[in-house]
Amino acid sequence: MSELQMLPAWLDAAGAALAGSAPPAPTLVGAGPPAPTLEGAMPGLARAQSMAPLQRLQRLQRSGLAECGGAGEPVHLAWRRFLRGRGSSVLVIDATGFDVRERGTAAVLAGAPWLLAEGVLIAIGLRDSRKVELRLPAELTGREAAFLNTVDAIRKLAQVATPGRQIEVQRDSRPGCWGEGRPADASRLVHTPETWCRIALLFAGAPFLDRGLDPDLDASLLTLRRGMTRRGLVELRRDGNLGRQIDEWGGGTEVQGQGQGRDAVLVFDDGLGGFLPLSASDLACDPLSLSAAGIVPAPSTLMVLAEGVCVVKQARRAVYRHWQLADGEEASVRGVLARAARLIAEITLGRGEVAHLAAIDAVAMELATLGLAAAWPLGSSLRYYREQWESHIRRESCPEGVCLERRAAPCHGTCPANIDIPTFMAHLGHGDHRSTIEVIRRDNPLPLTCGLVCPAPCESACVRGSHDGAVFIRPMKARAAELCLADGGYPKPTLSPDTGKRVGIVGSGPSSLTAGYYLRTLGHDVEIHEAQEFAGGMLRYGIPAYRNPPDLLEKEIDQIRALGVRIFTSAPVASVEEFRKGYDAVFLGLGTQKARLLPIEGAHLPFVLGGIDFLREARSGEPVRVGPRVVVIGGGNVAIDVALTALRQGATHVDLTSLEKRREMPASPGEIELAVAEGVQLHPGWGPLRFEEEGVAVFQFCERVKDETGRFDPKFDADRLLELEADHVILATGQGTDLACLEGSGVENTRGFIVADPKTKMTKVPGVFAGGDGQHGPRTAVEAIRSGKIAAASIDAFLRGAALDAAAAAAAAVGLPVRRAEVTPLPVLADDRTHLRRASMPERSVEETVGEGNYVKIEEGLTEAMAHDEARRCLRCDLCIGCGLCMVACSEMGVEALRMADTSAGRLAHFDFLRPAERCIGCGACTQVCPTGAISLEDRDGVRRTIITGTVVREQPLLRCSDCGAPTQTPAHREFVRLRLPDHMAVLLDRELCPSCARRRADRPAARRIETPVIGEERA
Ligand code: SF4
Ligand code: SF4
């Protein structure tokens, strides 16, 4: 069911009723035929205009209408404050404030925009508000038309109904938060869009009721989100029971609380409004009952999280958000919110002590006393989930295992091979390419190949990606590898003593090379058997030479040979059963070297080729020739490789068709752009229907590729056809494995791929392991490397006689990110760290790279300067874990020098290195709380430097103790303290003593202190 279908009756009916009416004049965008009278079009406004301001207020008071959302304050109180206000007034219609359900706001605007306009116009006449400020969300999720109509309506109608008003629209105003001060401001009248609609309905009264609108105003809109069986807008009846309404809204929750005292968690307003166990939802929904339960009195959204969620972590997120929303509020408000955020962060980082529990209780009480909305998430979590809080503090454990750990940098955790990226980037930035390669090869033995061909999932996770472009990680590996190869080869890893065990490997693709490398370093004797003339498997025969030149690949494979791994080429293994007799363990890295043809008419015709067969032949001794017109079918990276290879194998015109629309094509966007640049004609959204003998490929239009559940289930429009002439059609639609060698070995396969235990990679046959594309299906090279690495760990455990679960544990351990070293951050200027942009890869021009037989490498690689800059752009997320403690500690001090940004990687990050350059006073509050030392103070040569992961954000001179001459504090810090001390104490600062000299003076006998003129005698 769509959201709009779930719109409550009043909103639906109001929208419908108003769609047939129009305001008196002028005619508005998107309005229906003009209505003859104001009463007809806007009965609420017409009636309000006949009332004095006080009468309007009484009407509101009698109705008991409460704010829809947030604190649920009775609307008449806000109007009363506004009426009593003095001086010039600004009428603010604020939809950005606390409304955490932008989609709900958009639905209100779409369902009844006129109603919103009418509510606002009723209030415009209240006071002499010369200025009306509309604060509306920047993003209205596709309801732009409704939004613009509403804005236009308010502007024009205000001129008609109450001339001379200035209407100002802000579309991305700073979000505020309920309870954080602004609503109590008498110069402003702030309501949510829904409340404005309710006001219009209330004043309209009978005329609206005649049109069938719901007379019951004692309800508000609630957006049901994740965890509810049905999602969208519903009415929360204030006189109803919460639990029963959850059931009525359509099947209740998807997540049910079960047994053992654990329970699903109701999360209000994205956590900002508090948490409630599902079992405690037997309560009324009026604001008083909800606030008595510790929940936001008028929630806007509701979601349900499964049992097992860490509520402490959720509370931390919510309190942080409240602190962020209170930006610009007075220092006392900021201070208490910052204290709450700091205490929770310390607890979730495992630094909580018993005193923290008392402190957090006290701060929750303080928030409630001050009427701050952060009291809801904090108070309700402490009330209902106290056990979780106690567990975090007393047992130093997060019951759900999601807090209390230092997570790897997002890039590091996302890399399938788990390369410690920030560490190698720092090594390369320091100019140490040998250490760079050492670090990479702890997790991936093929840094050069990956540096050339990897789709770099690490870059999609890079924290900097949500700011100004991810760090360009991929080519940094290639650069370090090339420098090393030019410098005598990769550094040799330490080999364990020989074990005397022999491992035989079938195939020499990325999983086999990886398994071989790590098994050799573990002391085993390794032999690799490759059926083709050259080693490398799919790296050589599946990836075109313009991306991965064979000479470079061979050099990299030589680095593995150099450790003693023997690779036999042109040595096919006919029978695994026979092969395993010569070894203590066997690894099958068979790859997917067979193209899968399509079961459609004409697929057997001689001009129809398999994509992977074509790529292999193109890289073999006697390359295949195609064209001049070639049609490639497929939307992945292999299809792009086939298309670009066809252009180098004789084709002059290449069409590429895919089932998916262009933005849905699985190929990397950069690859697609490259294909277009080389002249490949894209035809996204077409599926092959048949191939005709005359050299025609016929396609039908693909309406959808997947069904609602995401399952592959293409649907076609058989009436929309596309015909393409083709001398050759090349299918890049799937690959399979040649499993003939498994005959009689007992190794199982399913749907053409080898079956192996996903944890240990061992097949049903003891001692025979499998990985790579032949086991998990066609994936990227780095995923094959991961599986080879995991297989090596469990083969090693097997060879050492360990039990299967120990083998699984060993394999699991290598599948986790491990920090390889702690490298000193690069010294980077604040301006550079903030503004350096991602490098763009230097590439040879199309003229230089295209043409028959031209496989010159397209990428030229990063220059030394570019690589250095990329290393400097890295934010060192291994050091700064994004906990935000430094920022809230600084806020608690009242300095507010640090501003971290929320990132798509789900953590905070320092991007703004310039703000502390202006504001840091060098007090050290941040360094006291930082759990990792990522932010530090350094005193040298009479100067204090504040440093964030290598970037000196501020340098300030240090004052010295007037007694001993030791450095004390910065002038800015002293001034900051002075302003906060009473005058009689502030003078003490002028004596500028270090703590120990101040203590020594305080310890002197009182008589001597009194009798002796301090300054004079001490100096004498
Ligand atoms: S900024 Fe650096 S450490 Fe952080 S995710 Fe990006 S590459 Fe990794
Ligand atoms: S600098 Fe330290 S305290 Fe600040 S966010 Fe990073 S790790 Fe946390």
Image (tube, rainbow, N blue to C red):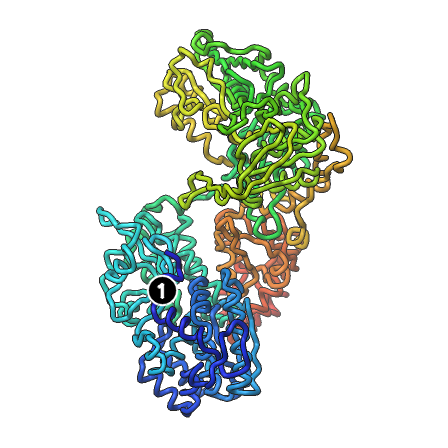
In the displayed orientation, state which residue is furthest to the right: 847
Query: Which element type, helix, strand or loop, lies under badge 1?
Result: strand
| Total marks in image | 1
The quarter of the rendering in which ligand 1 is drawn is top right
The answer to whether residue 723 is seen in the rendering is yes
Residue at figure coordinates x 49%, y 63% from the top left: 324
Q: Position of residue 857 (x, y in %)?
A: 71, 30
Q: Quadrant of residue 81?
A: bottom left
Question: Which is nearer the eye, 538 or 647?
Answer: 647
Residue 824 position (above or below residue 563): below
Residue at figure coordinates x 51%, y 13% from the top left: 525
Residue 403 position (above or below residue 129): above
Q: Position of residue 782 (x, y in %)?
A: 54, 31
Which residue corresponds to mark 1?
222
Q: Position of residue 444 (x, y in %)?
A: 55, 29
Q: Quadrant of residue 969?
A: bottom right
Residue 689 position (above or below residue 663): above
Q: Position of residue 964 (x, y in %)?
A: 60, 58
